[in-house]
Amino acid sequence: MAKLDGRAIHLAAGVAIGALTIAASPSKSAHPGQPLAALSRLQPGLWQIRELGNDRATPQSICIADPAMLLQVKHHKEPCSRLVIADQADQATVHYTCPANGFGRTWLRVETPRLAKIDTQGIVDNTPFAFRAEARLLGPCGPKRSARR
């Protein structure tokens, strides 16, 4: 039997407690039709996603019917499954998996019904990404744009 030092025991205990906390945490994934509390405050429409900390990045506009798509900024055109890690009135953390094209973990904070902050990272097209952005509702989707779900 291997002998563990104090640091290894402390690390193992921390991992075990973390796993138990995640397993015991309530998750909305058991109720897929129920919107996340934070997302229920956001309005559908034409949203502009502006990357923070990168002045050269061109803002991206996305017409969405379901504000949950803000959780998948890098995978917004793909059907993905989601696991809710945290769901509070003003913020949510979600891990999502897109079978054909990677995965991500997103933290979203709702500032107002028309403004949210996004911090997301994961893999898309076999390439890692880390992205912090501000999402701002510009208004309703125009007649030439179709809302995505």
Image (spheres, rainbow, N blue to C red):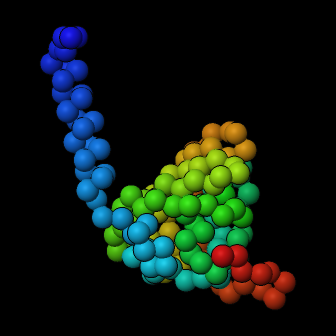
Vertical comparison of 103 with 117: above or below = above
Q: Is residue 95 visible?
A: yes
Vertical comparison of 88 with 133: above or below = below
Q: Position of residue 12 (x, y in %)?
A: 24, 29
Q: Residue furthest right?
A: 144
Q: Is residue 53 visible?
A: no
Determine whether, in the image, residue 6 is placed left or right of residue 83.
Answer: left
Is 2 in front, or is 147?
Answer: 2
Q: Position of residue 139 (x, y in %)?
A: 65, 84
Q: Position of residue 109 (x, y in %)?
A: 43, 65
Marks counted in the figure total 0
Determine whether, in the image, residue 135 is placed left or right of residue 92.
Answer: right
Which residue is at 23% across, 21% downward? 8
Q: Position of residue 33 (x, y in %)?
A: 49, 79
Which residue is at 21% across, 11% downward? 1
Which residue is at 70% across, 76% downward? 148
Question: Image quadrant of residue 136?
Answer: bottom right
Q: Residue furthest left?
A: 6
Q: Residue furthest top?
A: 2
Vertical comparison of 49 with 67: above or below = above
Which residue is at 59% across, 78% downward? 66
Q: Which quarter of the rendering shows the C terminus?
A: bottom right
Determine whether, in the image, residue 37 is placed left or right of residue 57.
Answer: left
Is 98 in front, or is 91?
Answer: 98
